[in-house]
Amino acid sequence: MYYELKLVMESEQHRQKLIVHKFGGSCLADKEAFAKTLSIMKKFQDKPTIAVLSAFKGVTDQLLKLIELAIEDIGAAEAFCAKLEAFHVDMAKQMISNEEASRDALDFVNARFNKLYTAIRDIFKGGMPPHMQDYVVSFGERLSTYLFACFLKGEGMNAEFFSGDSLITTTADFGNAMPIMDKTRVKVMLELVPALQEGKLAIVTGYYAECDDHLVTTLGRGGSDFTATILANALVEYYDPEVLFWKDVDGLLTANPKVEPAATLIQEISYDEAKELAYFGSKVLHPICLRMAMERDIPVQIRNFNKDLDARFTAISKYKKKTGEIVKSISSVDTCTMITLQGAAMVSLPGIAARLFAIMAREKINIIFISQASSENNITFVVNAQEGMAAVKSLKESKFFGKQWFDILHEDMSLIAVVGHGMAYHTGVSGKIFTALGDAGVNVRAIAQGSSELNISILVEPKDLKQAIHAIHEKFITKLI
Ligand code: ASP
Ligand code: MG
């Protein structure tokens, strides 16, 4: 037992640190941004390095538009494609000054666009099989990443381009594929590890991969972040990876600064807390990326690309118990729709919640909050404001709930999520929260607490949102700083 542990510890120690950078479209916007990206890569160049890239800003949306055009009008699609090509040619010429690297990049752009023209003609003639969309949108990352690799080579860096499909295998769920990690690990071992061991900088396309049939798949919008954590996860046998997301925000904050002026940067947060924040409001990092990192204990950082390299940032890792800290962050959804289903018929009648949720599932409406009083007289749930009316309509029109013995009420609300591991270790936290809200004159309309005690969700009227956040922030966060 002791020896086993010792062996594990020794092999852990031997794993060399590796950095996975993720650069989004705004890190590749212009000459200055390219230079900044290069300086970031150089700063960490003593360690094995991977950079995962998104498409140039707006290009994925344009490729989706290209598909729409190709279905209807091939002439318009070709004209649109020509503009996209001109944009990429222009980027290659502007960003890459080294002659050989520039020629390489221009050849690549030319060859990729030939394929893209063929693809849109195929769509026009033969329609759109589901995998075609993923194939076409993958060109955004192919182009940006290849150009960036050429740029780095032109600057004398030992860079090598990798296409995401050669490293990651996914399910065949086009548009939203999920990685198959054992297959991915084999590819990463055969393709990526040798290059890293030779001291190469691996420059990898984000967002797309392939399924077992070797068709291109994509990992969902914003999926380049996911690519970065998938690769890190697949590399843990060989390296001790850390993922650095270069974004246009400082990191995760204690509250929305537009609502709470005292909001500050969170410098350390656990995976679970960060995931909780991601579900509510904060769009900084998708929870699925955090899950990938958390599974293998891979530290993650969110850093601001536009700031100095030494600027403060958010580090996400395993939870470390701290004294004193109870609430980590307060996130909020400004407006959402609260729907209450009530009626004496519901008391002790099994299957009501199941029927309700089945209807929402059928309508593809996402439920973000649920609460039921133990009297069972009503169920309250919350959906995004855009889906509110559709949710009410589907209930009113349903055979079961449409009957007169149910009242279906709806109202605009604001949802506040108070997040922090510390809440699980302290008694009386919710009491203190509600006292703070009461003292601030805020009327709480409904509450729910996850059983992990990581999150208390509170519904208040939109007019009270600012006050409510301020009261909680003041009591639990500002006072500690
Ligand atoms: N380019 C893709 C998108 O816009 C993926 C990404 O940017 O992460 O969704
Ligand atoms: Mg993007």
Image (cartoon, rainbow, N blue to C red):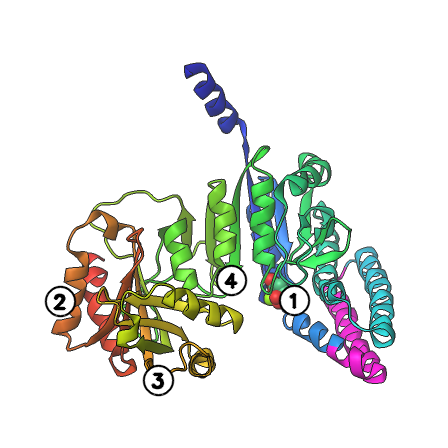
Q: Residue at the location (64% across, 73% down)? A: 58
- The residue at 35%/60% (across/down) is 265
Question: Could you tell me the amino acid type at mark 1?
Answer: Lys
Magenta span has 82?
Answer: yes
Q: Position of residue 402 (x, y in %)?
A: 41, 82
Q: Nearer the viewer, residue 198 or 327?
A: 327
- Report helix, strand or loop for mark 2: helix
Residue underneath mark 1 = 31
Please report contact status of discs 2 and 1: CB closer than 8 Å, yes or no: no
Res 435 label: 2
Residue indicated by mark 3 = 404
Q: Amino acid at mark 2?
A: Thr
Q: Which residue is mark 4?
A: 247
Which circle's residue, 2 or 1, is located before the other in the chain?
A: 1
Q: Nearer the viewer, mark 3 or mark 4?
A: 3
The vertical placement of 189 against 264, above or below, is above
Q: Earlier in the sequence, mark 2 or mark 3?
A: 3
